[in-house]
Image: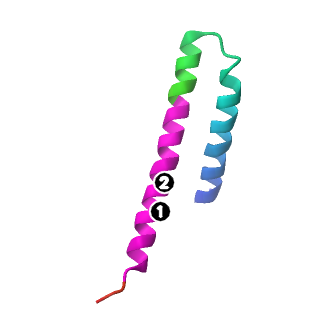
């Protein structure tokens, strides 16, 4: 699966989790959903950071 597809799926998961969270009443399930949501956001942010670093390195003049 291409990287862009992974990012789109992660964004979709995050949006659905945020919408569903309001309906969750079980404290354990709510905590688990929040933890997965936090991890998803962290992975997305890390991906953006890595892309920015890679782009900066690739754009650096050689020599």
Relative to 41, 26 lies left or right: right
Q: Position of residue 4 (x, y in %)?
A: 62, 58
Which residue is drawn at the image coordinates 65% and 54% (left, top)? 5
Indicate whether 62 appears above or below 15.
below
Check disc 2: other Cα within 10 Å, few if <14, some if 14-19, many if 20+: some
Indicate whether 3 appears above or below 26.
below
Label placed on residue 16: none
Check disc 1: other Cα within 10 Å, few if <14, some if 14-19, many if 20+: few
Residue to which mark 2 is pinned: 47
Residues tagged 1 and 2 counted as in contact (Cβ below 8 A): yes
Q: Position of residue 54 (x, y in %)?
A: 42, 68
SS for dot 2: helix
Which residue is drawn at the image coordinates 52% and 48% (left, top)? 44
* Residue range corresponding to the magenta coloring: 36-60
Residue to which mark 1 is pinned: 51
* Quadrant of res 3: bottom right
Colouring method of the image: rainbow
User: In the picture, which quadrant includes the N terminus?
Assistant: bottom right
- Single out the residue that lies furthest toward the left: 63
Which residue is drawn at the image coordinates 50% and 33% (left, top)? 38
* Quadrant of res 22: top right
Q: Position of residue 49 (x, y in %)?
A: 44, 56
* Quadrant of res 63: bottom left
């Amino acid at each position: 699966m291409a990287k862009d597809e992974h990012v789109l799926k992660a964004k979709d998961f995050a949006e659905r989790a945020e919408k569903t969270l309001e309906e969750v009443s079980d404290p354990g399930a709510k905590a688990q959903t929040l933890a997965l949501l936090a991890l998803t956001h962290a992975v997305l942010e890390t991906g953006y950071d890595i892309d920015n670093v890679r782009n900066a390195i690739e754009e650096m003049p050689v020599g």
